[in-house]
Image (spheres, rainbow, N blue to C red):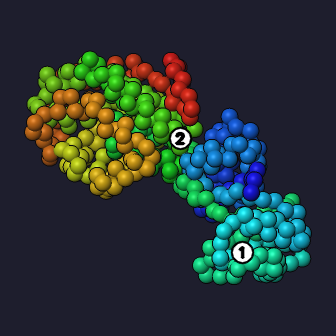
C-alpha cells in the first residue's frame, strides 16, 4: 500500500510539565532540519507530530527519523474520514495487502464527539475485516497483525506497524557540553550517549603535528560526521598541542607525563568550554581501562578544574562500548591505526595512582599557563553538519 503520511509519538516528552512545550518545539525543529532537503510538511500538535511526504522519499525519511532523539516511535499511516464506514473501508484496504492468520484492532478516540467509543470502534472494524477476508481469526493476545485506529476531528489515522525511534530527549533541551574526542572507540560513544539525553555537543581535539598526522585529525572529523546523524550540527575545535606536549616530555618525569598531559588538556578544555557557554565536559573515560582512568588518576587530573565532567561510559566494559560503536557505525573508523596525542609519547610505566602534589611539583618546572593561553588563542574550528562540512574561521 502506498503511504504519504507519518504519525510520530513523543513518548516521555509528554510528561515534562511546564517544559513540555519547549521539549516538543525543539523536537519539531530538529525533525524539520533533519528532513530539510526533502519535500515534506511537518505539523506539530500537543501529543503527536505528522509528516506529509513524497512516496519516493519514504525509505530515506524512515532511516533519518530513526536517528532523531526524542522520538519513541512512529508509523506510516493511512487517513480516513472520521466516520465509521470510511474507517472500516481503509482498514480493510490496509490488511488486504498483508499475509497473516490472526489479528486484532486497537482504537483510540481522541475526538470525544465521535458517536462510538473505543471498544465499539474496534468491534466494528474487526467484524468488517472478518466478513471480508478468509482463513483469519481474532487473537487479542499475540496477533500477527495489530490494526491501530486513532480517531481525531480532522481525520482518522490507521496503521499496522510501530517503527521504533531513537528515544531519549531532543538534542538541545539539556544545554551544551564539550566532548573531548581523541579518535578512539570510547569518546564517540560517549558523545552519542550525551546527545541521547538531549545535550548538544561541541568537540575538542588535541593535535600535535608533526608527531600526529593529518590522517588522525581526518579520522576525528569522520567520527563527528557520523555523530552529526544524531545532532543538528557539531563544531570541532582543534587545539595545536605540540609545544605543550614537548614541554611535558622535557620537564616531567615519564611516569607522570600522562597525568600532567591530561591535567593540561582539562585546563584547556575548561577554558574553551567557558568561552563557548558549555556547561559540562564530556569524555570517554571508563574506570580502570588505562592508567589515566583509575579513580586516583581521575581525581588528580580533574582537580585542576571546576566544571563538571560527565563520563557516559564510565561503568561500561570494553565489549559493551564496542557494541554501541558498531551500532552507530563509528567502530571501523575508530580502529584505524593513526596515533593521537595520548599514544605518541606513552611511557612504559605510567603512574596509576599519581599524587596531586607530585604533579604540581613537575608543573612548576615550566610556564604552563602561558602555553595554555597560547593553545586557547590559536583554536582552529570546523563545523560538522548533516550531509555537509563547512570550514569557518569565526563561529562565535
Q: In this view, does 185 lie to the left or right of 196?
A: left
User: Secondary structure under badge 2?
Assistant: loop
Residue at the location (57% across, 51% down)?
66
Residue at image position (33%, 27%) is 216
Which of the two discs, 2 and 1, sits closer to the camera? 1
Secondary element under disc 1, as helix, strand or loop, is: strand
The residue that label 1 is drawn on is: 106
**Residue 311 place in picture, x, y as percent:** 36, 49
Q: Residue 354 carries which label?
A: none
Residue placed most toward the observer, 134 or 186: 134
In this rendering, would 350 be left or right of 202?
left
Instruction: Count residues near mark 1 (Cα–Cα under 10 Å), then give few for <14, some for 14-19, many for 20+.
Output: some
Circles 2 and 1, Cβ within 8 Å, touching? The answer is no
**Label 2 sits on residue:** 229
What residue is drawn where x is 46% and y is 23%?
Answer: 381
The image quadrant that residue 271 belongs to is top left
* Residue positioned 67% across, 58% down in the render: 75
Q: Can residue 20 be seen in this view?
A: yes
Nearest to the observer: residue 325 or residue 188: 325
Can residue 13 be seen by looking at this rendering?
no
Closer-to-camera residue (91/298): 91
**Residue 8 vertical placement versus 143 (above, below):** above
Amino acid at each position: 500500500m502506498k503511504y504519504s503520511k507519518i504519525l510520530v509519538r513523543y513518548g516521555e516528552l509528554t510528561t515534562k510539565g511546564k517544559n513540555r512545550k519547549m521539549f516538543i518545539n525543539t523536537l519539531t525543529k530538529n525533525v524539520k532540519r533533519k528532513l530539510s532537503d526533502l519535500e515534506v510538511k511537518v505539523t506539530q500538535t500537543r501529543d503527536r507530530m505528522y509528516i506529509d511526504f513524497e512516496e519516493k522519499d519514504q525509505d530515506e525519511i524512515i532511516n533519518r527519523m530513526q536517528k532523531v532523539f526524542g522520538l519513541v516511535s512512529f508509523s506510516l499511516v493511512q487517513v480516513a474520514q472520521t466516520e465509521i464506514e470510511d474507517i472500516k473501508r481503509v482498514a480493510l484496504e490496509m490488511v488486504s495487502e498483508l499475509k497473516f492468520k490472526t489479528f486484532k484492532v486497537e482504537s483510540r478516540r481522541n475526538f470525544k464527539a465521535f458517536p462510538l467509543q473505543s471498544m465499539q470502534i474496534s468491534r466494528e472494524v474487526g467484524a468488517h475485516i472478518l466478513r471480508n477476508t478468509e482463513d483469519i481469526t481474532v487473537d487479542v493476545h499475540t496477533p500477527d497483525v495489530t490494526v491501530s485506529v486513532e480517531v481525531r476531528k480532522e481525520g482518522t489515522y490507521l496503521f499496522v506497524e510501530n517503527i521504533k525511534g531513537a528515544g531519549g530527549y531532543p538534542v538541545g533541551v539539556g544545554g551544551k557540553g564539550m566532548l573531548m574526542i581523541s579518535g578512539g572507540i570510547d569518546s564517540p560513544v560517549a558523545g552519542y550517549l550525551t546527545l541521547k539525553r538531549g545535550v548538544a555537543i561541541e568537540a575538542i581535539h588535541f593535535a600535535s603535528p608533526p608527531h600526529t598526522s593529518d590522517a588522525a585529525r581526518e579520522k576525528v572529523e569522520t567520527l563527528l560526521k557520523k555523530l552529526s546523524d544524531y545532532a543538528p550540527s557539531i563544531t570541532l575545535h582543534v587545539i595545536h598541542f605540540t609545544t605543550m606536549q614537548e614541554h611535558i616530555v622535557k620537564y616531567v618525569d615519564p611516569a607522570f607525563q600522562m597525568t600532567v598531559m591530561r591535567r593540561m588538556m582539562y585546563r584547556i578544555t575548561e577554558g574553551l568550554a567557558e568561552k563557548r557557554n558549555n556547561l559540562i565536559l564530556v569524555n570517554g573515560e571508563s574506570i580502570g581501562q588505562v592508567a589515566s582512568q583509575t579513580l586516583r588518576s581521575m581525581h588528580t587530573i580533574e582537580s585542576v578544574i571546576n566544571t563538571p565532567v560527565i563520563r557516559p561510559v564510565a561503568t561500561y566494559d570494553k565489549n559493551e562500548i564496542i557494541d554501541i560503536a558498531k551500532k552507530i557505525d563509528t567502530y571501523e573508523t575508530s580502529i584505524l591505526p593513526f596515533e593521537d596525542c595520548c599514544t605518541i609519547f606513552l611511557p612504559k610505566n605510567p603512574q596509576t595512582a599519581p599524587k596531586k602534589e607530585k604533579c604540581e611539583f613537575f608543573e612548576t618546572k615550566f610556564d604552563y599557563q602561558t602555553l595554555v593561553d597560547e593553545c586557547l588563542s590559536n583554536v582552529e574550528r570546523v563545523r560538522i553538519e548533516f550531509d555537509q562540512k563547512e570550514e569557518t574561521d569565526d563561529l562565535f
